[in-house]
Amino acid sequence: MEKTHRYCVIMCGGIGSRFWPYSRTENPKQFLDLLGTGRSLLQMSYDRILSLVPAHNVLILTNEQYAAKVREQLPDIPEDNILCEPARRNTAPCIAWAARHIAARDPEASMIVTPSDHLITREAEFERSIREGFDFVESHDALLTLGITPTRPETGYGYIQVGPQVSGAIHVVKTFTEKPDIELARTFLRTGEFFWNSGIFLWRASTILAAIAECAPDVHNVFEAGRDAFGTPAEAAFIAEAFPSCLNISIDYAVMERADNVYAETVSFGWNDLGTWSALYDISPKNRDGNVTSGCQVLSYDCSGNIFAVRGDKLVVARGLRDYIIADAGDVLLICPKEDEQRIKQMVNDAKVNYGDKYL
């Protein structure tokens, strides 16, 4: 298939609550320059895909409230390539809409779907892997996910168990397991059959639409009702009316765990989903005590393994801290052991219950 039939959908509608209090509803993490490179995570995601997909075939799927930020950070994106969800309904409705939109524009289309807030450090290997993935899905009736070679028994990720090899680094998928406990994660690591679920997918638009129709009829029926609107001026009005009625469900639960044509390409290209403070800690330079400092000066005494992320001209003085997150966003100060960071989402919910949207 010609490169001109290849498309990219960058999903950019999340609020990154596990990165609170830096990631906020009005300015979530995909729009932040967390690495000090001068480019946000969204901009870096866009930059790395341009060697694989023509710029005019890159679509950004975001929430209506972030449309202006997307246009500001990606001024070269055509206006029609920014698809704005009127409500948050997770990744299955998001992908169903994007696939319908692309298929109406190009019935021969293949597509990569990628989050906007991941870090890839070995970009040449990323490019090679994606080209292999495109070639596979363009010649097979396949739903392909990228499985990351695990480096530790991580409990915050989903896992893919792979079966027989079918082509190069591509294997049949046997099972999916979402966020195992630590003992199970250690077992997964020992077997060598399990890979982290990256949330990066490749398929033909027609293949994913057929899978949604079979595996997620509730999602399919919402969009099928407006099938003649896609690719026409009526599409926006149809989405505004119909999209909020979609089931709130991920593509993993809706399709990938149910379909019988799911494959995984096992890859190792320096992937980090930057989903948590610990993930940022892992990739950041550390001082001799293993502490990371971002945006502040720190005097530490008997402290190790911490991340100090403090905005403003502040001096942080700390004693006796081990493996803590200290994140000061001005109006919110978070102090939390790294081992408990999976509870930050609950802390955000508690802040909402007690204080409304003031600190979100």
Image (cartoon, rainbow, N blue to C red):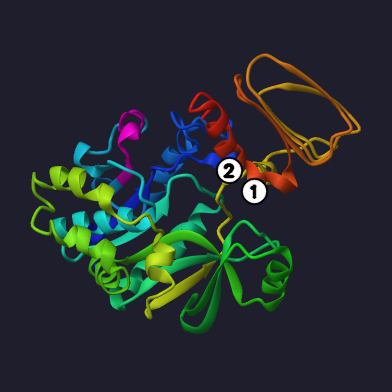
In depth, the one of 225 and 18 nearer the eye is 225
In the rendered view, does 229 fall on the left or right side of 241?
left
The residue located at (54%, 26%) in the rendering is 355
Q: Which mark is residue 342?
A: 1
Give, as a single range, the part of the protein colored magenta: 60-72
The residue most toward the front is 354
Q: Is residue 66 magenta?
A: yes
Element assignment for label 1 = helix
Q: Quadrant of residue 71?
A: top left
User: Answer yes or no: do the residues labelled 1 and 2 have beta carbons within 8 Å?
Assistant: yes
The residue most toward the right is 302
Instruction: Tell me the kind of residue under disc 2.
Output: Lys
The residue located at (66%, 59%) in the rendering is 155
Element assignment for label 2 = helix
In depth, the one of 193 and 244 nearer the eye is 244
Q: How many residues crowd mark 1 within 10 Å: few (<14), some (14–19), many (20+)?
A: some
In the rendered view, does 308 fall on the left or right side of 196?
right
Quadrant assignment for the N terminus: bottom left
On the image, the x and y values in percent for residue 44 come to 45, 41
Q: Which mark is residue 345?
A: 2
Q: How many residues crowd mark 2 within 10 Å: few (<14), some (14–19), many (20+)?
A: some
On the image, the x and y values in percent for residue 323 come to 79, 41
Q: Is residue 22 visible?
A: no
Instruction: Tell me the kind of residue under disc 1.
Output: Gln
Q: Is residue 81 visible?
A: yes
On the image, the x and y values in percent for residue 83 come to 26, 43
Separation of residues labelled 1 and 2 (CA atoms): 7 Å
In depth, the one of 273 and 253 nearer the eye is 253
The residue located at (51%, 48%) in the rendering is 118
The rendered magenta stretch, by its main secondary structure, is classed as: helix
In the rendered view, does 145 fall on the left or right side of 297?
left
Q: Which mark is residue 213?
A: none
